């Protein structure tokens, strides 16, 4: 029955990261690349640990409670989640550069982080974008959702 539990991370013969099961097609490879850049490079792993090691259980829970409501604007200590995400992307990108896994065209895995960087740079999530459209241009009608977000 343990295989039917869906926490954020499940330990199998690998770590199964559950936080981003779906999303825009061009972003699908972004989260695995983020984690590879952190977990497969000891320097990046140390940098990520240094970033979070003094976070209390209460602070972590507050993030879990606040991020779904405030997204990148969620406050944390003297910063916000957007800046934490930016730092995570920097750490991962450095790890991917050191990993130096290139495809046949000489491109590194770091390119998979670009859609995530775009999200952080623009400062709002896809959910916030959809809510803005729903309450504005779509006039509280979900019909456009199916054509405008189909296969994106």
Image (cartoon, grey):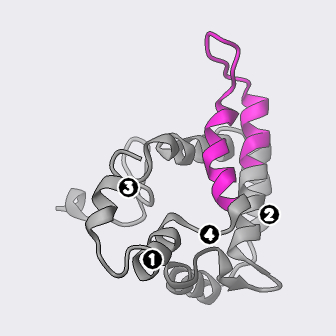
Q: Residue shown at 70%/85% (left/top)?
A: 75
Label 3 to label 2, Cα distance in Å?
A: 41 Å
Q: Quadrant of residue 100?
A: top right
Label 3 to label 1, Cα distance in Å?
A: 13 Å
At label 3, counting other C-alpha atoms closer than 10 Å, the crowd grade (few under 14, some 14-19, many 20 or more) is few
Q: Which mark is residue 131?
A: 1
Residue 3 percent coordinates (x, y): 23, 56
Residue 50 percent coordinates (x, y): 80, 63
The answer to whether residue 19 is left or right of residue 100 is left
Outermost right residue: 78
Label 2 to label 1, Cα distance in Å?
A: 35 Å
Label 2 to label 4, Cα distance in Å?
A: 26 Å
At label 4, counting other C-alpha atoms closer than 10 Å, the crowd grade (few under 14, some 14-19, many 20 or more) is some
Provide the residue designation for mark 2: 50
Residue 8 percent coordinates (x, y): 42, 64
The answer to whether residue 105 is left or right of residue 133 is right
Provide the residue designation for mark 4: 124
Q: Residue shown at 71%/46% (left/top)?
A: 92
Name the foreground residue: 152 vs 35: 152
Q: Quadrant of residue 119?
A: bottom right
Residue 101 is a magenta residue: yes
> Considering only order in the chain, which callout, 4 or 3, is on the residue closer to the N terminus?
4
The answer to whether residue 145 is left or right of residue 52 is left
Q: Quick check: can you spot residue 52?
A: no
Label 4 to label 1, Cα distance in Å?
A: 11 Å
Nearer the observer, disc 2 or disc 1? 1
Name the foreground residue: 103 vs 133: 133
Provide the residue designation for mark 3: 148
Nearer the observer, disc 3 or disc 2? 3
Q: Quick check: can you spot residue 82?
A: yes
């Amino acid at each position: 029955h343990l295989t039917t539990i869906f926490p954020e991370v499940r330990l199998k013969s690998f770590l199964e990261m559950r936080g981003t099961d779906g999303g825009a097609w061009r972003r699908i490879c972004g989260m695995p690349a983020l984690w590879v850049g952190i977990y497969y490079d000891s320097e990046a792993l140390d940098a990520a640990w240094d970033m979070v090691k003094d976070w209390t259980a209460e602070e972590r829970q507050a993030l879990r409670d606040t991020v779904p409501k405030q997204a990148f604007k969620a406050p944390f200590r003297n910063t916000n989640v957007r800046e934490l995400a930016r730092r995570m992307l920097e750490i991962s990108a450095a790890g991917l550069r050191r990993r130096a896994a290139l495809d046949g065209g000489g491109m590194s895995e770091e390119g998979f982080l670009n859609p995530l960087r775009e999200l952080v740079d623009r400062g709002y999530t896809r959910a916030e974008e959809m809510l803005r459209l729903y309450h504005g241009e779509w006039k509280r009608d979900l019909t456009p959702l199916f054509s405008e977000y189909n296969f994106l």
